């Protein structure tokens, strides 16, 4: 064991994850609605600002960081060796990278060159992904491996036949997609967590190192010189800083060896929040707030917001025990990957079937209301799929 963490699922973390996914579905849907206010849209890359929409992705990263210590220690408690743990981390990273690349390329399928309707290609990809990463409960393991093998074969075939853009582009990481970016940050955070053996001081140091790495990569001598290859990882370093902030908060709240309780816990979390806010404020003149550019000020302000939000949820759920309302979010919180891809499956299914929403649902207040309703419906659908035994796990 690396840290002596509280056992069992942490309801406040599941609630935070579920709420984040619900908001994610809403903001992804509302992005296609015209006539919505600017605070419901992503800030443009050349602007020095952020909206609540720009906090959704970092909230995912933050929750990944909160979950890493629990995941690593759980596997060690089950008897995983060092190398088996690394295999699991690499497998999960590869899964996120593959899913991210496929999802990013699904938007650019050239039907004529691929020999397949783009919506059909996307749906076959999602079906294959579900076969690979579904949690099976068969008594005979070979049945599970048959399903997984069929899914892997499907992904390989779809990757080979894929053509995008003008028909000449093959499947590849033009960008890694949201899940791919999470995958890189997850990998780096896991390495750092093990390297520093869950030491809070070491993790705090590495948050500063990640921010410093981004700053170094912004220097013209690095970007345009022989060290330009370093800049390819500057965004991943910034994203890793957010993951590490989530990891640090988990240690403060749930590492029993640290013994942070009552006023001591409040002062430690408040101190972390103040440090991050001051750092974000001091960095902003040099690095404007920009999600597109993954600037340090955006990373740190986002992490500060996540710290405040989770702390409120922890107080409400784990201290005051006001938790009945969280039941609505539990299916999404415990099955985040399926919840994340489900809206895309619905979208491509409607596209393939030729079903279009009424024009009024694509603009203004009716469009906003529809997107909110759609997000809620997706959570109910996930709950039903869970009962049918469809649950994805990387």
Image (cartoon, rainbow, N blue to C red):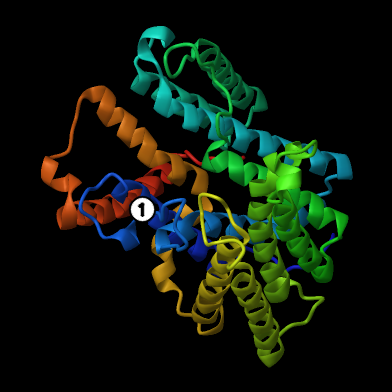
> Does residue 115 appear anywhere in the picture?
no
Q: Position of residue 35 (x, y in %)?
A: 20, 53
Instruction: Identify the residue at horizontal 59%, vertical 55% (top origin).
Output: 61
> Does residue 16 appear anywhere in the picture?
yes
Left or right: 331, with 206 as reference point: left
Query: Which is nearer the eye, 165 or 222?
Result: 222
Give the farthest residue toward the bottom. 263
Query: Which is nearer the eye, 347 or 209?
Result: 209
Left or right: 115, with 187 as reference point: left
Question: Does 60 sit above or below residue 146?
Answer: below
Query: Which is nearer the eye, 243 or 143?
Result: 243
Q: Quadrant of the N terminus?
A: bottom right
Instruction: Identify the residue at horizontal 44%, vertical 61% (top origin).
Output: 19
Question: Does 357 sit above or below residue 245?
Answer: above
Q: Position of residue 304 (x, y in %)?
A: 58, 71
Left or right: 386, with 241 as reference point: left
Residue at image mark 1: 27
SS type, badge 1 = helix
Query: Which is nearer the eye, 325 or 29?
Result: 29
Instruction: Identify the residue at horizontal 54%, vertical 12% (top origin).
Output: 157
Question: Does 61 sit above or below residue 306?
Answer: above
């Amino acid at each position: 064991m690396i840290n002596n963490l509280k056992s069992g699922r942490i309801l406040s973390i599941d609630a935070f994850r579920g709420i984040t996914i619900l908001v994610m579905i809403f903001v992804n849907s509302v992005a296609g609605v015209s006539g919505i206010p600017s605070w419901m849209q992503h800030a443009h890359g050349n602007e020095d600002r952020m909206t609540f929409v720009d906090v959704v992705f970092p909230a995912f990263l933050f929750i990944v960081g909160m979950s890493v210590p629990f995941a690593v220690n759980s596997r060690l408690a089950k008897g995983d060796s060092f190398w088996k743990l690394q295999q699991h981390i690499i497998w999960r990273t590869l899964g996120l990278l593959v899913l991210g690349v496929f999802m990013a390329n699904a938007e650019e399928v050239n039907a004529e060159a691929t020999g397949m309707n783009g919506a059909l290609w996307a749906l076959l990809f999602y079906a294959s992904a579900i076969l690979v990463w579904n949690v099976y409960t068969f008594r005979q393991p070979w049945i599970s491996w048959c399903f997984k093998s069929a899914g892997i074969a499907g992904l390989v075939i779809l990757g080979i036949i894929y053509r995008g853009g003008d028909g000449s582009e093959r499947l590849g990481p033009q960008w890694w997609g949201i899940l791919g970016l999470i995958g890189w940050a997850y990998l780096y955070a896991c390495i750092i967590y093990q390297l520093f053996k869950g030491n809070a001081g070491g993790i705090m140091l590495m948050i500063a190192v990640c921010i410093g790495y981004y700053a170094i990569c912004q220097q013209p001598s690095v970007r345009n010189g022989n060290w330009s290859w370093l800049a390819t990882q500057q965004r991943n370093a910034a994203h890793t800083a957010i993951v590490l902030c989530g990891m640090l908060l988990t240690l403060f709240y749930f590492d029993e060896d640290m013994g942070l309780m009552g006023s001591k816990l409040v002062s430690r979390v408040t101190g972390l929040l103040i440090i991050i806010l001051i750092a974000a404020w001091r960095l902003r003149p040099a690095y404007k707030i920009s999600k597109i550019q993954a600037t340090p000020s955006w990373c740190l302000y986002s992490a500060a917001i996540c710290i405040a939000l989770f702390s409120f949820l922890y107080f409400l759920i784990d201290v005051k025990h006001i938790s009945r309302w969280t039941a609505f979010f539990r299916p999404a919180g415990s099955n985040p990957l399926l919840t994340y891809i489900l809206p895309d499956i619905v979208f491509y299914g409607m596209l393939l079937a030729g079903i279009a929403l009424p024009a009024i649902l694509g603009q203004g207040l009716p469009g906003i209301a529809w997107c909110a309703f759609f997000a809620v419906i997706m959570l109910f659908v996930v709950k039903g799929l869970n009962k049918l035994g469809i649950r994805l796990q990387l």
